[in-house]
Image: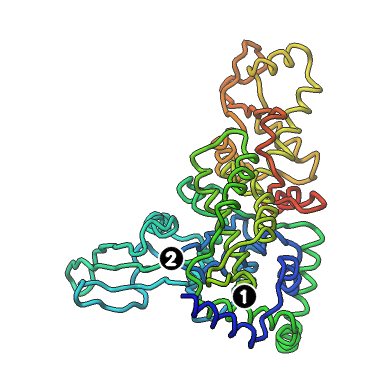
Amino acid sequence: MENQAQQQRKDNESVTLPKEITLREITDVLSLTIKYDDDNKLIVFLCMLSAYTDKSQMNVSLNAPSATGKTYLATEIARLFPDEDKVIRSGASPTSFFYGPGEHDKERGAKIVSLERKILLFYEQPNPALQEKLRALLSHDEREITHVLTNKSRGRNQADKIILRGFAATVFCSAGMRLDEQETTRAILISPETTELKIKQAIHLRAQRSANEVKFTEWLESNLERARLKKRIIAIRNENVDEVIITDTDIIAIEERFLAMLHTVKPRNQRDIDHLLQLIKTITLLNVWWRRQPDGRIVADQVDIDQAFSLWEAFFESQNLNLPPAVLSFYKKYITPAYLSKYKSADSVIRLAMDDDKIGLTSQELGAYFMQEENTALNNDLLRKQILPQLQAAGLIAIEKPKTNQNDIDKRTRHIFPKQLTDRDKKNIGIGGVDEDGLSGYEQLIAML
């Protein structure tokens, strides 16, 4: 073992290693085709890069309305990765996914579908039944997951045994904002920014690309830093890293730092710590040559840990609440201010009833406040079916009939009661995907409605 380590050091001395790289430098390269969305594009990039670990692959779910750039973001980042490492689906039925390319194992009477070190991309929301079948894969329950499916072809029913082998880094893109908790805990939730500045930059970029696709592609492929990043990705893949180690001392500090972010621990935090550790290990992978120890182990250092925490904090609030960032922004920007506006303008009787949680905010009052602020109508269908149920499930609002004897209050109409957070509760609140100027929540909402 010692002789092998000595030989490894000699080999390293004779090879020019790639220079160390930071997440800021990765962001600069990604910004060539993806404007703004810095935290979001880093998360998606790192998710795809995590495919080149043995079992630390990440899952990311991009949830945003149509035309906000979620598919574009995933597509542009995927261009950096080798085609043979990607499994791309625009959509898939619960069974069709399993009938892709594979190898037949006669001894086991099964077809083996290998997802080892693969990037699995769904550009449209997969069938909920398929997501259910993939839960064991996404949570890394077993390296081999067996599915027995009924094949009704050729006029008869036949049981087909399909074995999924290995783990894939998975990216889901969905226009739906209402998510099943089984899926939300298995992935990092993100929503693309839709700020005015980003949209203008995106329009300019699309105009340039559409005007002369060949010229744009030549410009893009000639960028030296982008070319180096693509070569780095292949070099990382070729290292065949099995495991990234976090030392005992560091893991204790990470656990304490993670728990300090929480006010009340929840069952889902067990998966959140996994997401954080996957981030740390993937960031370490970026500089694998500089993290290799004399004994051959790849060990994360403090820079990797700090970068991971910085990125994690940007999504912690919405992640902890099981909410896409755009839905949380709606609560902060419109529901709470509309409720407080009603309270401020109400007479003493209504205020007393609101203090006692007997009267809340009606959908009509929320719509009027939104119209006043944004000069556009609120999409009540989206509000009723996707936004309010998510906020209610997160415990940020209650939806109940008013409890008052006042004749001018329609007691059949359900009211929205926002839950006011105390200073202590706000320890659970992070940045939630809002950009440096605090604009993304507002702009995401305009795109939603």
Please, what is the three-letter code of the amino acid marked with disc 2?
Phe
Q: Nearer the viewer, residue 297 or 47?
A: 297
Residue name at image x 68 percent, y 47 percent: 432
Disc 1 target residue = 289
Mark identifier at residue 131: none
Q: Position of residue 306 (x, y in %)?
A: 69, 55
Is disc 2 surrounded by few (<14), some (14 to 19) or many (20+) residues within 10 Å? many
Please identify the quarter of the rendering in which residue 144 is found. Answer: bottom left
Disc 2 target residue = 167
In this figure, which colouring scheme has been used for the structure?
rainbow
Q: Nearer the viewer, residue 21 or 154?
A: 21
Is disc 1 surrounded by few (<14), some (14 to 19) or many (20+) residues within 10 Å? some
Label 1 secondary element: helix
Relative to 31, residue 13 above or below: below
Please, what is the three-letter code of the amino acid marked with disc 1?
Trp
Q: Is residue 227 visible?
A: yes
Please identify the quarter of the rendering in which residue 136 is found. Answer: bottom left
Relative to 253, residue 127 above or below: below
Residue name at image x 73 percent, y 38 percent: 334
